[in-house]
Image (tube, rainbow, N blue to C red):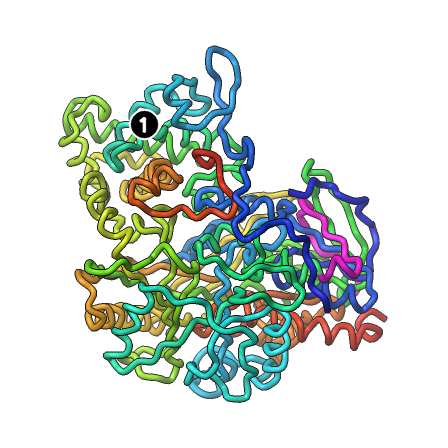
Amino acid sequence: MVAAPQTTIPDETDVLIVGAGAAGCVFAAVLAQAGKSVLVLEAGPGWEDEDLISSGIWSRKLRWGGPSTISTGEHPAGVGFNSGWGFGGAALHHYGTWPRMFPGDFSMASDHGKGLDWPFSYDALQPYYDRVQAFVGISGDSAAEPWRPPEDADYPLPPLAIFNQARLIAKGFEKLGLTTAPSPMAILSEPYGDTGREPCIYDGWCDAGCPIGSLANPLVTYMPAAKQHGALFQSRAMVTHIHTNAKGDTATGADYVDEASAKHQVKAKLVILAASTIHNPAILLNSVSEAHPAGLGNRNDLVGRYFMTHSIAPIYGFFDDEDAENYLGVTGAQMFNVSLKDEPKDGAFGALQWLIGPVVKPNDLLGVAMSRADLFGKDLEAFMQRATRHMGVMFGFGEDIPQFDNRVELSESLGPDGTRLPRVVHRFDADGLGVNTYANTLGLSIMVAAGANDPWAAPRASAHLIGGTVMGQAAETSVADGYGQVHDVQNLFLAGPGLFPTSGSSNPNFTNHAISLRAAEYIVERWGGLTG
Amino acid sequence: MKNRRKAAFTRRAALRVGSVGLITVTVAGCQQEMTPADAKSAGAAYQTLSDTEALTLEALGETLVPGAKAAGIAPYVDAGLTAASADSLLMIRYLDVPAPWTGFYKTGLAALETFAKGQTRTNFADLDAETQAALVRTISGSQPDGWSDAGAPPAPFFYFALRGDAIDVTWGTRKGFETFDQPYLAHIEPPDTPW
């Protein structure tokens, strides 16, 4: 772990980036390469490869370790499990499952009269998807995906190896006339370029962090590129407030507290908030001033609104006559299936993605033992003996429709420098619940068709933190424009999945990278106008 | 844009990480680092839990997962509660319970004791295994009458969290994986018990 402070932290910089996760690192790489001085302040530790110990228990240190966020509402989102802490952010422990979003995800309101539209189409993002995947290296089989837009560039690497678990479950899809394809993974199936990253060895410790760099976490992708061009990364520096000029239309810098709770200030020509779906709105709402009495960028009470999370339908079954090899592979998925939002789902509306055959270890939240939380004692032991070699797993990720009342807001609990800590309020609407119910029913049918014994569905879970600072065409309906530029403040940009106006059912990190690359290059092109 | 990184790891660089993750305990007045199982064997003093709470926790853990007591569930939880929340490895970190978590465990264990005494007039730890299992079954699915509502977590949630701890300490290690003939396949090898 990098000790803090590692360098003398400048008190003035061209670009201040808040958060050293996936989005922050993309911005840092592009802007540093363009010759800007870049300072990245990260609230958590300065993780390095050596810290990524192969243990589900140990990996908990990679989750948010700062002041607590409260998660509440009728269907609370899983904030603790899905958050990051330190260099790499949530992408340090993410699973590397990188499907793109689909054209229909960008025009949901126009097409269906539900939710929101993005301020640009899929076509505008497609070149950035292609460039990110060329840089990062994605393993997959383009030809096997009938749902994939034909104009998309092919994956640069062949798919990862497929083990018994996924092969067995895929037979169930096939019998029901459903297509499966190798899951597109930001994990190297072969050596790739001159990155020095190693191909995957299929040990299934992805969520503990991948120290050989096979999985594209920021420590091995955009962070080294940013450092190569002089970007400074500072750990244990928690930004609390963004400042503006008196008029309120220009950001001037930020306050942060260090590990010893000492307060500091840094001036910047341009500020990028990439502090996470939860902490971007929290920092904005805490940044109250005369010009922004309801919080920065919150003139229309939209900061924190339209928070989303994917529902998960966990489906299991036993293949008693086979070694399911469920300890081999990757934590994300070996194969996947996509049902677009306008395909029928028993009256519910929304997209559904099946992630098939993730590795399951004996313990941890998504481990073997937690798949039957009702069992304990001798019954649990007997279940474990059967399941650790014979259980097959798949997860149905359902779309969450953006709703105004699902939100990140400030609680009454106090955090560093007098800030109020965030609270997340969430409930699935009838469509969100309907897609999840449909997934449970369909998933059990698939397991039966695959020949699995005693299939079961575990209670609904949730994954991914999306929305809350949505982008759009107008200040009356969104917090930021299509590049993440806050409507009211010319040199303040937001980054991360918090910008997404819709969730689709795709894992968000690939799209997160693509919109970040697009916005970062926009800033470089418009630098004079944005900072003049 | 080039992306180069140091070749710090080979494909299976089984790196021992020294004392990383060992818990600090007090034995005979001296602080030492050791695994929870060793701490249990050495009779190390608890830093956050009381001895009575630790006894209840051991009995509950053993009911949930056979072997949890010997694996050191009480020292494990005690270490997780004593550490700063950012350094704690307890599963409760995932469950969106605001830190610090000492109150969650202490009030939950007290509620379990009250519930056990209300049902049997006996401490939970002193009950036979069959009765302990019956009580755990009662609290696992719904909030039973007699479960304290004085600040204690809901009974099924307490069951879920403590069950997770018992699974972690018993089966979340290389030794635990071996119980099920499950290859551990470490990139970076944790200590014998990884906390």
- Asked if residue A368 can be seen in this view, the reply is yes
Q: Quadrant of residue A244?
A: bottom right
Give the tally of numbered discs. Answer: 1
Tell me if residue A68 comes above or below residue A143 in the rendering. Answer: above
Q: Residue under circle 1?
A: B70
Q: Indicate the position of residue A153 as horizontal and vertical percent values.
A: 57, 83
Quadrant where the N terminus of chain B lies? bottom right
At horizontal 19% and vertical 39% (from top left) the residue drawn is A378
Q: Is residue B23 left or right of residue A264?
A: left
Under tag 1, what secondary structure? helix
Range shown magenta: A225-247
Q: Quadrant of residue A198?
A: bottom right
- Which is more toward the observer, A501 or A379? A379
- Asked if residue A313 can be seen in this view, the reply is no
Which chain is mark 1 on?
Answer: B
Q: Amino acid at mark 1?
A: Ala
- Which is more toward the observer, A293 or A217? A217
**A233 within the magenta span:** yes
- Which is more toward the observer, A134 or A425? A134
At horizontal 60% and vertical 67% (from top left) the residue drawn is A192
